[in-house]
Amino acid sequence: MTGWEVLIQQSINGLTRGAVFALIALGYTMVYGIIELINFAHGDVFMLGLFISLAWFTLLGVTGTLTGWQLLTVLPLVFVLTMLTTATLNVAIDRVAYRPLRRSTRLAPLITAIGVSFMLENVALLWKGPAPIAYPDVFPSFDILREWFGVDSAIFLTSKDLLVVAATLPLMVALHYFVTRTRWGKAMRATAQDRETAQAMGINVERTILITFFVGGALAGAAGLIQGMYYNIGQWWMGYQAGLRAFTAAVLGGIGSMSGAALGGLVIGFLSAWSDQYISARWTNAIVFSILIVVLVFRPHGLLGERTADKA
């Protein structure tokens, strides 16, 4: 491969990574925007999304590649079931672990979130064991450039790459529409801006928080399913690393900004892929965090974040 072909190939890899990071980062930034909580358990909800989607595939008797009508019916069904399951799980986490601490100091919910993260990891460890699990290759995999266009190229643009973009982009657009155009979305933005004033104006703040956790959990579940179909492998500790990258993406883009979280996820994805190729995978985390520090030095609120007054 020539230098340009390598760059294009790694950019494609970065796009697919970044799209998954963006979905996870959106859940982080939504929760922080509403209740100013860094939900460290969110990455583990993503990990459980992979395990739960595998359980749904197994329950539906899917063990190989889906074709024909199954691809058009079973796959969307598993998407919906997985997102509903992880959304319900995320709401349950909030009701049990975070809601009782709503009026406590900021440190208490933060420590609780770390504890919930460890609990979810150990649930996954007991459920699937310490060894990596094989995820069935349910989505047809082929090289689009060769199969569709007859191009003999060193660059591989696979059907799975297209799946990642085709699945994540509509979810991001739907989330943007939900937040900006619907009554619940407007309630979320009002609560994020000033919770006490929103409550005084008749907005049910607790219901708004519940919806926020529901939507964030659904996005994490979708990301877990996409991750499983793309890489065909899952591990009980994968939520920690993905959650760390997604949280970094949310901070880089501007914590509390949804467009910033999406942008940050894509930036982290590209940086990770380019660093793995041109430097070393061992240095990728160091490089990503170094760039994060440099950005925050010159723009403390992130790439798309806005300076806001501290909430009382």
Image (spheres, rainbow, N blue to C red):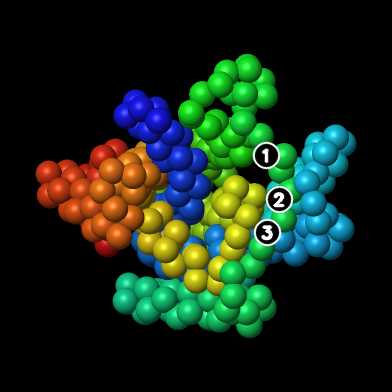
Residue 301, percent from left and from top: 23, 47
Under circle 1, the secondary element is loop
Please report the residue visible at 66 percent of the width from the left and 20 percent of the height from the top: 148
User: Does 202 sit left or right of 276 as displayed?
Assistant: right
Q: Which mark is residue 137?
A: 2
**Callout 3 environment at 10 Å: few (<14), some (14 to 19), or many (20+)?**
many
- Can you identify the residue that label 3 sits on? 135
> Which residue sits at x=37%, y=73%?
110
> Which quadrant, please, contains the N terminus?
top left
> Given the image, on which type of amino acid does mark 1 rest?
Ser
In x, y percent, where is residue 52?
69, 63
Residue underneath mark 1: 141
Seen from the viewer's position, the closer of residues 193 and 51 is: 51
Q: Secondary structure at mark 3?
A: loop
- Give me the C-alpha separation between circle 1 and circle 3: 14 Å
- The part of the image, by quadrant, that contains residue 87 is bottom right
Instruction: Pinpoint residue 30: horizontal percent, then vertical percent.
Output: 45, 52
Give the residue at x 48% y 53%.
24
Q: Is residue 21 left or right of residue 131?
A: left
Residue at screen point 34% across, 44% down = 277
Residue 165 in which image quadrant: top right
Residue lying farthest left?
Answer: 298
Q: Tags 2 and 3 in contact by the CB under 8 Å rule?
A: yes
Q: Mark 2 touching mark 1, by CB under 8 A?
A: yes
